[in-house]
Amino acid sequence: MNASESWRDFDVPRDLLLAISSIISALPTSALQLLAMRVDCRGLPGTYFKELFSSVVLRCGPSLTGLDIPDLLSHAAINHLTQLSHFHTLSTGGPPPNFSPSSLPPVFPPLVQLTLQDHAACGWLPLFERLEHGVLTTSGVTPLSRMKESLRFLDVQDPSGSTFDISLTSPIRMFCNLTSLTVDVWCGVPGNGQCAFGLNDDDVADLAIALPQLECLILGHPCFRNTCATTVVCLLSISTYCVKLRNLEIHFNTINIVGNLKTTSEDPRYEALRQLPKCTLSSLVVYCLPLVLHESDLGTVADGMIDIFPSLERCSGPPENLGWKKLSERIAVHRGIMTASEWIASDFSLV
């Protein structure tokens, strides 16, 4: 606490703060393997426990494999983590230290799983770019070399629903061995805010090409606004470049879905893609993404979606999303999962 701050400035009793600090300081940490530190003290500044948490991390030994901490760590504590050879899991909500060009860490630990809570990605992803491109080496080995090889799971959590675009996905493309990428962004409730999805078809294609090992790809949760620049064309790129994919959530504009599907089937630019093996995705999560189709277009869209995802069985969304419900029934008929008579007898109709 700064000298100018007094205990009465906070809602938390002084005795409780002293007790918490005492307990944390007394923790035996040299043999810890996993460490999670979460203190919800309303009324305290966000960095109040920075020095205390950092001291705990500095006392951890080489057996530490994982850390979950929402707050900022000191420069020394981060440097200590980079030197732990078995450290592979990090979950943090705080920004990284403000490294100067002369103090960039020589190597970053071979993380397997990284979770960036709240707005942490705004600081950590630019840091990774600096570590990768801002350090000149004669051998071609950068501070991120080991992490680029090891990282398998990246989870970017941002419950505030801020916009994400190429500035977020560009640094991620260097982690070519990722099997799971989750950008947990919601666009907000109806009447508030705007669509958070700022990528286009080419941006998504670049991401898919860079991350061929993906099994799970969640790029925000599709919203009802239907204003994004992506179309079903981006789904073709994902299916062909990420053949191991099993889970997918992504915004794409459905206003001209019939025309867009015709583009993927007739445009020579996509002919080569259509001939490549595709992923075995069986369920496409659409959430609140709207879909309004004429009855005569159902077959065209069903055929187009099956062409992109040959194993597709359904489009998963809320029960009231009747457009996707009807399309799922037509897909089931085409794939032999449902008979034509069962589809005709359906009680659902398009909106």
Image (tube, rainbow, N blue to C red):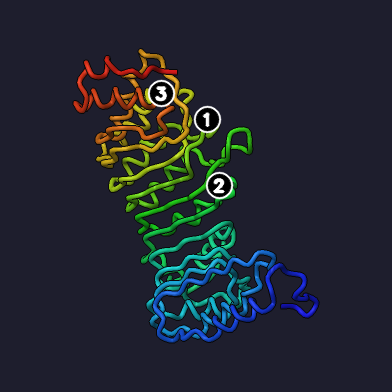
Q: CA distance from mark 2 to mark 1?
A: 16 Å
Name the spot of residue 93 as percent of width and height, x first. 55, 63
Q: Is residue 298 above or below residue 143?
A: above
Q: Quadrant of residue 4?
A: bottom right
Q: Residues within 10 Å of mark 1 (few under 14, many from 20)?
A: some
Q: CA distance from mark 2 to mark 3?
A: 27 Å
Amino acid type indicated by mark 2: Phe
Name the spot of residue 330 as percent of width and height, x first. 29, 22
Residue at 39% across, 51% down: 210
Please give the residue where the numbered disc 2 appears in the rendered image.
164
What's the mark number on residue 226? 1
Amino acid type indicated by mark 3: Gly
Which quadrant of the rendered structure holds the N terminus? Answer: bottom right
Q: Is residue 299 above or below residue 142?
A: above
What's the mark number on residue 128? none
Q: Is residue 116 above or below residue 59?
A: above
Which quadrant of the rendered structure holds the C terminus? Answer: top left
